Amino acid sequence: MTPKLVGRFAPTPSGRMHLGNVFSALLGWLAVRSAGGKMVLRIEDLDPRAQHPGLARLLMDDLQWLGLDWDEGPVYQSERKQIYENALELLKNRKLVYPCFCSRAELHAAKAPHASDGTYIYRGTCRNLSPAEIAEKSRLRSPAYRLRVPELGKPKELVGFDDLIWGHQEKHLAQDCGDFLIRRSDGVFAYQLAVVVDDGAAGVNLVVRGRDLLGSAARQIYLAELLELPIPRYAHIPLLIAPDGRRLSKRERDLDLGVLRAKGVNPARLIGGLATLVGLVSPGTEALPADLCQYFDWNTLREHRKDIVVDDEVLQSLGIYR
Ligand code: GLU
């Protein structure tokens, strides 16, 4: 028997939900509910700057307004520091992490190597510090912690997985990101660690999220293996992008659910319209998520995996008039 699907919403409460968040929440929910699975809600408020209890409440209210329900949670990452600390200890004991004293300026320097997506590749400056050097540097600043990834060509350095939308993916960790952050120097745990620990703890076995996170999956799989957690399946869905090519985001304040709801946008038109963008239903369909489960289909999503430009015509199809 195939295990029951467990998916999750994992919003960062740094603002009101915007169209892109609604789109990925909808597809994640449909993927799970159409297979009779369960949804978990996790509020990703790791960073103290993203800890607004009011915003988390609004997020939940928006999900409910859209007809996107969940069975477990909310789980707040801000309440789980000890659990992340335990995972860090485990990795430390196995000598898989090391303290890093590099400043932001050093890390982002123009001469630092960068991966194809523009993120820097850590060069390993602090990889082999002696205990004396660590003690000396610790007097001046508190360190971040990095996970040691195997060198190019060494076992386990190449991580492969099958994305439900993009097919087989392979990443060379050493080339792609280098030793990556597990905890920042201000003590805040890195997204990569928290997401792996939390998905593992909640039994999440299907992660549906934006294509911008496709590059993180290999790091997360590598970490899950080290922590002996099961590896979920991944589906990285298209991004909604603005006509100028930028990713649609919380910057587009007039497209967040606070504004849209105040304008009287119809949730059924919005949901039906978003499902139309990936070919699940025909244009003009008005439906709440529960009515769309029967149309959910991975093959259709694979055929519609190109990013979507949200221009005025698309907005009108969602019932939004600027
Ligand atoms: N919290 C992330 C976001 O809001 C999602 C992380 C994930 O899905 O792994 O973009």
Image (cartoon, rainbow, N blue to C red):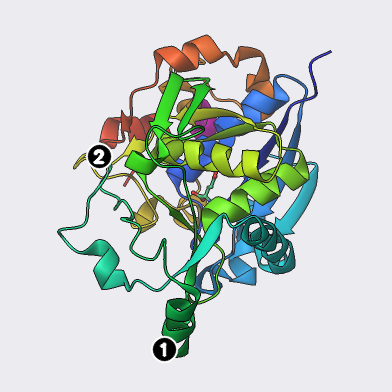
In this view, 57 is above or below 101: above
Q: What is the crowding at mark 2: few (fewer than 14 residues within 10 Å), some, or many (at least 20)?
A: few
- Whether the magenta-drawn stretch holds residue 320 is answered as no
The front one of 165 and 312 is: 165
Question: Which residue is depicted at the point 37% across and 46% down?
Answer: 177
The front one of 291 and 97 is: 97
In this view, 16 is above or below 48: above
In the rendered structure, find residue 99 and report the number of the disc placed on it: none
In this view, 40 is above or below 287: below
In the rendered structure, find residue 140 and report the number of the disc placed on it: 1
Disc nearer the start of the sequence (1/2): 2
The quadrant in which residue 248 appears is top left
Q: Which residue is mark 2?
A: 116
Q: Position of residue 29 (x, y in %)?
A: 64, 32
The image shows a total of numbered marks equal to 2
Q: Name the residue type under label 2.
A: Ser
Q: Over which residues does the magenta segment extend?
A: 268-272
Answer left or right for 144 relative to 92.
Answer: left
Q: Position of residue 67 (x, y in %)?
A: 67, 38
- Visible in this render: residue 238? no
- Visible in this render: residue 269? yes
Under 8 Å from ligand 1: the CB of mark 2?
A: no
